[in-house]
Image (cartoon, grey):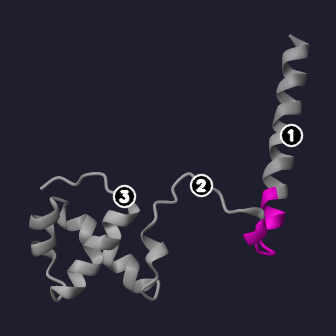
Amino acid sequence: MPGRKTTFEERLLIIEELIKHDINYNWAVNKYHVSYQQVYGWYRKYRKSGNDPQSLRDRRGKAKPKEAWTEVDRPKAENRLLKAQLLRKEMEDAYSKK
């Protein structure tokens, strides 16, 4: 069965029901019409995070808030910014020479 898009609340409900039914992936696939891989992946993330429901959120494309940055993240961000500025300067210089 092909997967489908789900919301955070729906994923959380599916995982809770999955646990109540003794982690029967096929039962969840048939009841909620999602793929086996989706259910398996959600459950694995949920267990790996120590049963934290926030692990089921889709955070792709969203940056960490600056308050949550670690000591390693700050220099990396500064480095990316400086590289981007240098590239922009090089492109401006190359364009002005033409």
Badge 1 or badge 2: first in the primary sequence:
2
Q: Secondary structure at mark 2?
A: loop
The residue stretch that appears in magenta? 67-77
Q: Is residue 75 left or right of residue 27?
A: right
Q: Which residue is mark 3?
A: 7
Quick one: which residue is furthest to the top in this view? 98
The amino acid type, in three-letter code, at marker 2 is Lys
The amino acid type, in three-letter code, at marker 1 is Gln
Judge whether 6 appears above or below 12 on screen: above
Q: Nearer the viewer, residue 15 or 9?
A: 9
Q: Which residue is mark 1?
A: 85
Image coords of residue 30 (percent x, y): 9, 65
Judge whether 51 appears above or below 75 on screen: below
- The CA distance from mark 1 to mark 2 is 22 Å
> In which quadrant of the rendered image does the N terminus lie?
bottom left
Task: Tell whether position 68 is magenta.
Answer: yes
Mark 1 burial class by Cα count in 10 Å: few <14, some 14-19, many 20+: few
Judge whether 97 appears above or below 21 on screen: above
Q: Is residue 96 left or right of residue 45?
A: right
Q: Which residue is mark 2?
A: 62
Q: Nearer the viewer, mark 1 or mark 3?
A: 3
The amino acid type, in three-letter code, at marker 3 is Thr
Q: Secondary structure at mark 1?
A: helix
Task: Tell whether position 20 is magenta.
Answer: no
Residue 70 - label: none
- The CA distance from mark 1 to mark 3 is 38 Å
Judge whether 2 appears above or below 35 on screen: above
